[in-house]
Image (spheres, rainbow, N blue to C red):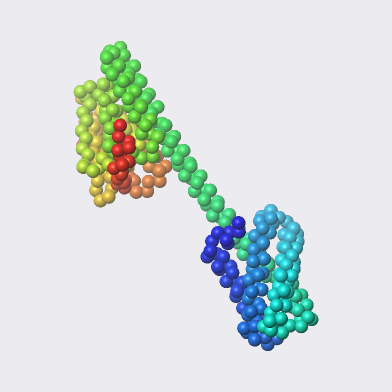
Amino acid sequence: MHPFFKDRLRLALYLSSWIVVGLALAGLLFWIRGTPIPSAMALMVPLALLYGVICLSALWVARGLPLQSASPIRLLAGWITAALQASAVWVILGVPWVLWLSKMGVIAAQRSEIIAGSAAFLALGIPLYFGSLVVHYLLLTFEASREAERTMLESQVSAREAEVRALRAQLNPHFLFNSLNSINSLVGTDPEGARRMCESLGDFLRRTLALGSRDAVSLQEELSLLDRYFAIERVRFGQRLHVEQYVEAGAERCLVPPLLLQPLVENAIKHGIAERIEGGTVKVAATVEGGALRLSVENDVDEDAIRRPGEGVGLQNVRRRLDALAARDARLDTYRENGHFRVTLSMPARMAAPAEEAAHVR
């Protein structure tokens, strides 16, 4: 289908331009022959609109003769051939209209004048068709530009989705590696603890598979998964690990990317609690302020420990996921002072619908 028929505004503008051409030809007829303006308009405006419809064929000529690949000789030959054919069709279809107007007394036209006029229209149709070709080449260029932009956006979205999936896939192996090392260390010294850790690990992985396949989960579901993670780590650290949680009323309904907090908490335990002989406390807080959900994960750190350059895998993963999700309004900041390390994450507060929450409650 011709693009003009898909957009009424474009079609109206196109036909309006041919009406202008018809009015110009009517004025020319009045100036040359003195034909009254109403009669000249009755003759020329319909003929111009007719040629405008014929010139829609320029679209297929422009497609068949692309400027980028066709040779100049082929282009010129194709354009002239198409223009002559269109002009000939215009004359063939226009002569009956002229004869009918002459019969009805709208215009006075002799046979010789009709023949001369047909020759004039045949010649006039060539530059007019070339003008239509220019319009259609511009139209194809515009359509190709839009299609290229759409393809680029689709590829960007696909690339970001693939990156998000890859980042999600990194979470379980990274955590699983650490958990298996912990189980291995417990097998000889605490077989019962190793068994409990295996059970908790299986339950945790089942939950990550269920949540990780979704684009967004409620904070309540994310915190529930976090409780299972803490259960695993308590087997490993015992009384050395303390957990404090504060969730403001209503914040638990906010939507967040799945598996967002677990890598931050894992980072807090690995680089904070595990390095302190006496252990420490991990604090998780969630509040809603000014339409933004603010999450924080804070842990004790050993001030005498050698500081490692860069960030842990958990922080890097979360940053990259936010970038991949194009979360322009999301922000992640880190602070370290007075023996504490805190990660704060801010993002727009999007509430899960009650029906949606109920559907995912197990």
Instruction: Judge by depth and name the residue closer to the eye, 50 or 66.
Output: 50
Choose top left, top right, bottom left or bottom right for residue 181. top left
Give coordinates of residue 80: x percent, y percent.
74, 64
The residue sitting at 55% across, 68% down in the picture is 12
Q: Nearer the viewer, residue 313 or 31?
A: 31
Q: Residue at x 21, y 42 (%)?
A: 249
Q: Is residue 204 above or below residue 317?
A: above
On screen, residue 229 above or below 32 = above
> Quadrant of residue 19 in the image?
bottom right
**Position in image of residue 174 (x %, y %):** 38, 28
| Relative side of 212 to 162, left or right | left
- Residue 168 can be seen in this image: yes
**Furthest residue to the top?**
188
**In-image side of 170 versus 244 (left or right):** right
Tell me if I can see residue 32 in this picture: no
The location of residue 86, given as percent across then percent down, is 71, 66
Indicate the quadrant containing the N terminus: top left, top right, bottom left or bottom right: bottom right
Q: Residue 143: where, in percent of width, then height? A: 57, 56
Which residue is pictured at 27% across the width and 14% down the height? 192
Q: How many marks?
A: 0
> Which quarter of the image is occupied by the C terminus?
top left
Question: Relative to 214, does residue 29 appear above or below in the rendering?
Answer: below
